[in-house]
Image (tube, grey):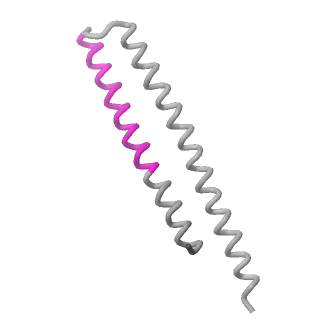
């Protein structure tokens, strides 16, 4: 496999993970909007609200960690491309 193909696959996988994170964020937003609506209608107990908030908070924390990992992957790819280009320039007669 050529380096360019490998880099394209890596970037594609990062993009798909970013898309998944976006969908997860939308789901958490909808969950919180539902909770707010139910609270206004007094259909949820305080404990239920706290439990849901804790769940959303943990999910968002994990999403932030995943985002940081994806950023590190992108930075590694940029470094690899930069290093590879420098090596290629030195090989040109």
Residue 34 image point, x, y percent:
28, 23
Q: Locate the C terminus and report the quarter of the image it occupies.
A: bottom right
- Decide: is 62 above or below 80: above
6 or 93, which is in the foreground?
6
Residue 68 image point, x, y percent:
58, 43
Q: Is residue 39 left or right of 10 when viewed as pictured?
A: left
Q: Residue furthest bottom?
A: 93
Q: Residue furthest left?
A: 41
Residue 28 image point, x, y percent:
38, 31
The image shows a total of numbered marks equal to: 0
Which residue is at 68% across, 72% downward? Answer: 84
Q: Which residues are magenta?
A: 17-41
Which residue is at 55% across, 67% downward? Answer: 6
Which residue is at 48% across, 25% downward? Answer: 57
Q: Is residue 17 left or right of 34 when viewed as pictured?
A: right
- Decide: is 51 above or below 72: above
Q: Residue furthest front?
A: 1
Q: Examine the residues drawn in magenta and state their main secondary structure.
A: helix
- Decide: is 83 above or below 28: below
2 or 18, which is in the foreground?
2
- In magenta segment, residue 62: no
């Amino acid at each position: 496999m050529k380096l360019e193909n490998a880099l394209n696959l890596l970037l594609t996988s990062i993009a798909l993970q970013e898309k998944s994170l976006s969908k997860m964020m939308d789901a958490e937003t909808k969950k919180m909007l539902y909770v707010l609506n139910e609270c206004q209608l007094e259909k949820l107990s305080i404990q239920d609200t706290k439990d849901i908030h804790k769940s959303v908070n943990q999910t968002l924390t994990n999403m932030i960690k995943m985002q940081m990992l994806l950023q590190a992957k992108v930075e590694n790819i940029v470094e690899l491309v930069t290093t590879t280009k420098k090596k290629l320039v030195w090989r040109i007669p």
